[in-house]
Image (cartoon, grey):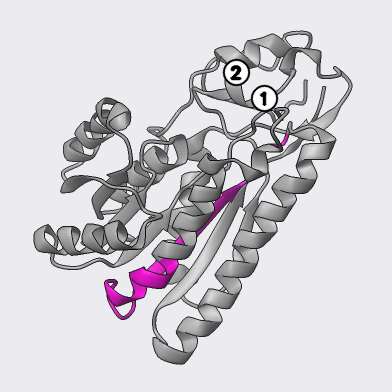
Amino acid sequence: MKKDLQFESPPTAFLENEISSFMKITPQYTTDDYEGSDKLLNKSVVVTASDNGVGKAVSIAFAKEGADIIMVYNHLKHEKEVKKTVKLIEKLGRKVWLFKSCTFDEFKCKRLFESILKKVPKIDILVNTFSISNKKDTETGHYLLRKNDTLKIQSLFTLGRLAPDYISPNGIIINSATLCAYAQPDQLIFYSALKAAVKTYTHEMNRMLALTKKSLRINGITTGFIWSDTLPDELPNYENLPTNMNSVTPMHPYEVAPLYVFIASQESKSIAGETLDAGGKIYKY
């Protein structure tokens, strides 16, 4: 095991010959080591898909930086889990609101923004944390064509088109795309296509915004393998992976949250239309 490979819990997760222990790791959404410095003080931030791991981690990190959080989720089954994050944010002394809404339908998306602005004075930042999950192929077609993932891409397009009318003039939009480091070779091609689509969309959307809303900027973040509670269902034939493979070190959600803070803060004001890649460290089994 490489000496620089460290995780908070459990410390033995990456011992050699214990590949199966990956599935036992509990995703960490925050850490006491991260202390905010008011980089986003009094900003109002909308976090879509806030029920997923990155969404939770970003919501908490932004709250630590002094922001008020508007958490958006799309299904009642996620409400209990999202409310746990709400309690953490309230303990940090920040305001937090919950909205249940789909984000790919234009009418419902407009209604979502209007409902938010009835309760929140302004929207400064929109963070889209939709994840593209790995799924096995079926006889009916490749997972890329399945409704769940195509709706996530549609949500990015719909939000990107509508959000500028509701966000503050000097606001920020942050898009996300994930690429599973352990996808099978044939599936990596399709992951790359989705990742490239989000990156190109972010770049072109920023060019369009520059013509109409010069102070509103949009950037993106792509991540590698992120721990989540649903990993056993998302990694095909995980138990059969070769033990001598080179891969990207899996990351906890809290480890990528600071990148979102950076992109949302004034420190990144010179960056627009770009995508940061957070692939993790290389680790050889």
Q: Amino acid at mark 2?
A: Pro
* Tag shown at residue 110: none
At label 1, counting other C-alpha atoms closer than 10 Å, the crowd grade (few under 14, some 14-19, many 20 or more) is some
Q: Residues within 10 Å of mark 2 (few under 14, many from 20)?
A: some
Between 148 and 266, the one nearer to me in the picture: 148
Q: In the image, is residue 27 above or below residue 179?
A: above
Residue extending furthest toward the right: 244
* Residue 190 place in picture, x, y as percent: 74, 47
User: Which portion, as a residue range, is magenta?
Assistant: 160-181
- Image vertical order of residue 77 relative to residue 44, above or below: above
Q: Is residue 191 left or right of residue 156?
A: right
Check disc 2 and report the residue beneath it: 232
Q: Is residue 169 left or right of residue 152?
A: left
* 199 vs 12, nearest the viewer: 199
The residue tagged 1 is: 235
Q: Residue at x 19, y 68 (%)?
A: 122
**Residue 96 at x, y percent in the picture:** 18, 46
Task: Say what amino acid the circle numbered 1 marks.
Answer: Leu
- Residue at 23 percent across and 31 percent down: it is 83
Q: Nearer the viewer, residue 111 or 165?
A: 111
Give the image location of residue 159, x and y in percent: 40, 63
Element at label 1:
loop
